[in-house]
Image: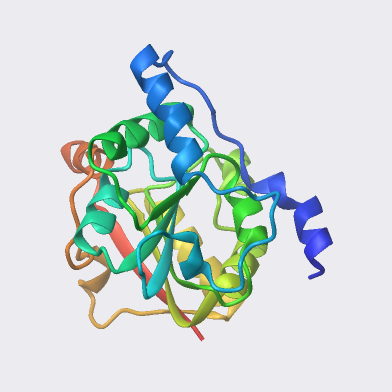
């Protein structure tokens, strides 16, 4: 796909809210200063080597789409300082929460984007990411809204373009219909191979997985989370 064509179709993946409760002045200040320090400027061309985006010396780069309150992203970036992490969250309250956290404990291996994830995916160079995480995304449970789910043929094309061969796409959800949807769409796509060693594998959390508030709520309400891993051919 021509890059300009990708950019012209970049916004079809975002349907969620951008604002929730009014953020406090302290959060607003952290958000402004944090985006100045950690935010990516997509008006500039992406560097051929993404490692140069970080002030830390990193050997790999991972992307988390829709990080919510940032619990998982902060955990991963803190435990793996030699890896670079890019977090995407258009929801202002979630981004403000993350920026409050990194104001207290700065992370040299973190960058963020506070807009539509498809814009970032189209900005990234080909075969530039070691991994993509899509964890507990909005399931859009009503059938008439399924077309709004982030996992789609076009977005899987985007994943396949930016992932390195052998790179991982990880998807977690507690909604059975979305899990099945993702398995079917990835199988139909062909560039992303599901990795499951045994019948229980897809219900086993990822190694080093920190439980999130979304996951805790799902378990309390009797829904069993699934953890899928796909490898880029």
Q: Position of residue 30 (x, y in %)?
A: 38, 27
Residue at the spot x=30%, y=63% of the render?
Answer: 227
Nearest to the observer: residue 232 or residue 50? 50
Q: How many marks?
A: 0
Residue at the spot x=46%, y=69% of the render?
Answer: 51
What's the image's color scheme? rainbow
Q: Quadrant of residue 124?
A: bottom right
* Direction from residue 85 to residue 90 in the image, left or right: right
* Direction from residue 137 to residue 118 in the image, left or right: right
Q: Position of residue 45 (x, y in %)?
A: 69, 60
Residue at the spot x=34%, y=17% of the render?
Answer: 26
Q: Is residue 172 above or below residue 149?
A: below
Nearest to the observer: residue 209 or residue 38? 38
Whether residue 138 is visible here, answered yes or no, is no
Q: Position of residue 71 (x, y in %)?
A: 26, 44
The N terminus, quarter of image? bottom right
Q: Quadrant of residue 203?
A: bottom left
Whether residue 79 is visible here, answered yes or no, is yes
Residue at the spot x=43%, y=60% of the render?
Answer: 54
Q: Is residue 171 above or below residue 103?
A: below
Q: Quadrant of residue 180?
A: bottom left
Q: Position of residue 229 (x, y in %)?
A: 36, 71
């Amino acid at each position: 796909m021509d890059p300009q064509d990708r950019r012209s179709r970049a916004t079809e993946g975002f349907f969620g809210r951008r604002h929730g409760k009014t953020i406090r002045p302290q959060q607003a200040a952290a958000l402004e200063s944090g985006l100045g320090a950690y935010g990516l400027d997509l008006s500039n061309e992406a560097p051929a080597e993404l490692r140069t985006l970080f002030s830390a010396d990193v050997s790999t780069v991972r992307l988390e789409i829709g990080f919510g309150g940032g619990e998982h992203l902060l955990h991963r970036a803190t435990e793996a300082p030699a890896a670079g992490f890019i977090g995407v969250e258009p929801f202002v309250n979630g981004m403000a929460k993350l920026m409050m956290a990194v104001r207290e404990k700065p992370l040299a291996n973190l960058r963020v984007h506070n807009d539509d994830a498809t814009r970032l995916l189209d900005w990234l160079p080909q075969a530039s990411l070691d991994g993509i995480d899509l964890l507990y995304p909005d399931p859009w449970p009503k059938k008439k809204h399924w077309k709004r789910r982030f996992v789609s043929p076009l977005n899987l094309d985007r994943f396949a373009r930016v992932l390195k061969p052998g790179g991982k796409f990880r998807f977690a959800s507690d909604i059975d219909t979305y899990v099945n949807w993702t398995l079917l769409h990835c199988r139909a796509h062909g560039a992303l191979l599901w990795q499951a060693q045994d019948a229980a594998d897809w219900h086993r959390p990822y190694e080093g997985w920190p439980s999130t508030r979304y996951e805790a709520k799902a378990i309390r309400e009797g829904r069993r989370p699934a953890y899928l891993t796909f490898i880029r051919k």
